[in-house]
Image (cartoon, grey):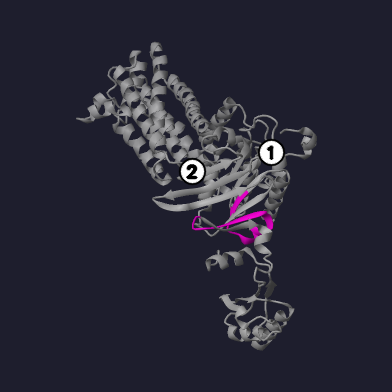
């Protein structure tokens, strides 16, 4: 089945002690694309991905990876799937490069270890035992182990946790390259920027359920909604007078009724103005800021961050 | 699916799917895992202490000094002591060392990660068992060499039966190791595996024959895997044959512990 999607989950349920950690979750990940499963800690991301890796059996629903069942067809899938676990899965007494060579020995035609070493900057700690590696170094080694077998699908559980910015950049570059080569990549993350910069498709997960999903660009560049409304977001000092802001925007030249506007301080220091936002609205908002003697540190229209999306959906911050 | 005309030169396309089945042959995967496990044990200082250095010290100490009063039943001290020390060596590798290594690998996710590679769970288990046997070869060579240098003269007819006893003991104690490693926390396994080794060595019929243990301990020790292995080794190397009762006891423990490990082992 060369054309089957990389991963298809349908109505997957996984319970621990009767409590559903994954609760009727459905998801599709394409080949040649990065799919992010985004959510707060404890949302069920790792359990979801473990069902894909054949490490857990779902209680209900179906999981297909490359058109095959991860449990029934494990033998066929193992050479075609790369896995990076959240806790690394690296034995502590082994040297970094020795571990990579060992994993490579499981494949008939592995990637060149020297090339991966170079790409991920492993050379500087090649002979260091895993026990003495930093968190970021372990992550890079675990990623190298996940891709050394030339997988068609890669599962990355929190790939850049504990990494310095440079390592993250190297990892992201590598992930983009895998995607260009047609590899399907599924990653979990609680980092907004990782999902925003890297993913083609995002599933936002909370309490084991998908609460929003779509192409990353669709989720972020929300244009005017069906009723013609847009959202203006700004960040400034907390505790500003939102009542005054509301009066300001209502006095604008738009013909809409005053009730069309929603003005809230969504969290301390973050304000949103939703309504028929037009260029004059921005002038009114900045005039209000001048009245308040407050300087905005950020002002955006339409473009939401995934953090906004999550906040809008749950009323909670992601981190 | 493997159209080379669109894939471009292999060198510039390192992530292209392999044209053949992606897994290395099964024998190579298991051989690789065996070598890996063996290196891990022999390189780890604490493991080396328990599996090689302590048994050698014990062998030399028991054979050459008389701090510990032994009833050698008419045999020379070295002939009487060596089978028990070999039994202890088997226990240290198949049980203590393997239980601790597997428990920490389980905690660190190593078992889960390797089970997602083409090695799989079966290959991982095979590699572990063969790794234990490889370390035991090293132990037998080292301990046998030291014992021979100290004047050990085993019954030649007992060599093969002794190797059989080593295999049976390995099966029983590896099963126990996996049962503990798969059910308890790593720190708990560390404590239990070391404590059990000491208790079984002293009072479990390993170094001292069950018949010399006080009271009811004699009957208990004969039924323990440690006592059965000790009796089997002494039977083989002193008398040239393994007592059938010991074989039955070791097979029974292997079946029970292996079944338990298969049922209760948790990968997470």
Q: Secondary structure at mark 1?
A: helix
Return the mark for residue A56: 2
Chain letter behind tag 2: A
**Quadrant housing residue B6:** top right
What residue would you read off at disc 1? A113
Q: Position of residue A163 (x, y in %)?
A: 63, 55
- Residue A164 visible within the image: no
Q: Position of residue B49 (x, y in %)?
A: 46, 36
Q: Is residue A228 above or below residue B16?
A: below
Count of number-bearing discs: 2
Q: Position of residue A36 (x, y in %)?
A: 62, 53
Q: Which residues are magenta?
A: A186-208
Q: Nearer the viewer, mark 2 or mark 1?
A: 2
Say which residue appears at 73% left-offset and 46% top-offset: A180
Say which label, 2 or 1, has the lower sequence index: 2
Nearest to the observer: residue A165 or residue A174: A174
For disc 2, the neighbor class at 10 Å (few under 14, some 14 to 19, many from 20) is some
- Residue A20 visible within the image: yes
Nearest to the observer: residue A119 or residue B18: B18
């Amino acid at each position: 089945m060369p054309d089957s999607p990389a991963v298809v989950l349908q109505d997957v349920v996984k319970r621990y002690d009767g409590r559903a950690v994954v609760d009727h979750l459905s998801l599709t990940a394409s080949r040649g694309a990065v799919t992010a499963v985004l959510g707060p800690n404890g949302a069920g991301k790792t359990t979801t991905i473990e069902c894909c890796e054949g490490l857990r059996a779902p209680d209900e629903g179906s999981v297909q990876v490359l058109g095959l069942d991860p449990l029934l067809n494990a033998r066929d899938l193992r050479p075609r799937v790369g896995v990076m676990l959240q806790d690394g899965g690296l034995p502590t007494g082994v040297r970094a490069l020795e571990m990579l060579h060992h994993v490579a020995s499981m494949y008939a035609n592995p990637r060149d270890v020297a090339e991966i070493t170079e790409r991920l900057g492993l050379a500087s700690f090649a002979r260091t035992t895993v026990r003495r590696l930093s968190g970021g170094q372990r992550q890079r080694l675990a990623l190298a182990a996940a891709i050394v077998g030339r997988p068609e699908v890669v599962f990355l559980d929190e790939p850049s946790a504990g990494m310095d910015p440079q390592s993250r950049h190297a990892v992201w570059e590598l992930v983009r390259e895998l995607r260009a080569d047609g590899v399907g990549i599924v990653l979990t993350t609680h980092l907004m920027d990782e999902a925003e910069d890297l993913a083609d498709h995002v599933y936002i997960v909370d309490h084991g359920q998908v609460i929003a999903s779509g192409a990353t660009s669709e989720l972020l560049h929300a244009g005017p909604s069906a009723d013609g409304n847009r959202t203006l977001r700004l960040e400034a000092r907390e505790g500003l007078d939102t009542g005054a802001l509301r009066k300001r925007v209502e006095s604008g030249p738009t013909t809409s009724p005053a009730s069309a506007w929603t003005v809230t301080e969504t969290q301390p220091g973050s304000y949103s103005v939703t309504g028929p936002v037009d260029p004059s609205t921005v002038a009114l908002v900045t005039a209000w800021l001048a009245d308040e003697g407050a300087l905005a540190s950020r002002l955006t229209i339409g473009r939401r961050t995934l953090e906004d999306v999550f906040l809008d959906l749950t009323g909670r911050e992601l981190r | 699916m493997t159209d080379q005309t669109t894939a471009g030169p292999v060198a510039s396309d390192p992530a292209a799917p392999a044209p053949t089945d992606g897994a290395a042959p099964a024998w190579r995967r298991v051989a690789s895992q065996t070598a890996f496990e063996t290196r891990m044990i022999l390189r780890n200082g604490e493991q080396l202490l328990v599996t090689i250095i302590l048994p050698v010290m014990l062998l030399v100490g028991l054979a050459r000094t008389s701090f510990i009063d032994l009833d050698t039943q008419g045999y020379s001290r070295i002939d009487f002591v060596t089978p028990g020390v070999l039994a202890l060596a088997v226990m240290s590798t198949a049980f203590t060392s393997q239980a601790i290594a597997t428990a920490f690998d389980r905690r660190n996710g190593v078992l889960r990660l390797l089970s997602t590679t083409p090695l799989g769970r079966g290959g991982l288990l095979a590699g572990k068992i063969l790794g234990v046997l490889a370390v035991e070869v090293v132990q037998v060579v080292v301990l046998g060499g030291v014992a021979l240098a100290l004047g050990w003269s085993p019954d030649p007819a007992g060599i093969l039966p002794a190797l059989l006893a080593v295999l049976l003991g390995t099966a029983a104690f590896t099963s126990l190791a996996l049962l503990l490693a798969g059910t308890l926390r790593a720190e708990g396994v560390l404590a239990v595996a070391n404590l059990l080794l000491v208790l079984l060595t002293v009072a479990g019929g390993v170094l001292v024959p069950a018949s010399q243990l006080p009271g009811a301990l004699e009957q208990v020790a004969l039924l323990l895997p440690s006592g059965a292995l000790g009796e089997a080794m002494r039977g083989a190397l002193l008398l040239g044959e393994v007592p059938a009762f010991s074989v039955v006891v070791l097979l029974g423990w292997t079946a029970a512990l292996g079944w338990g490990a298969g049922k209760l082992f948790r990968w997470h």
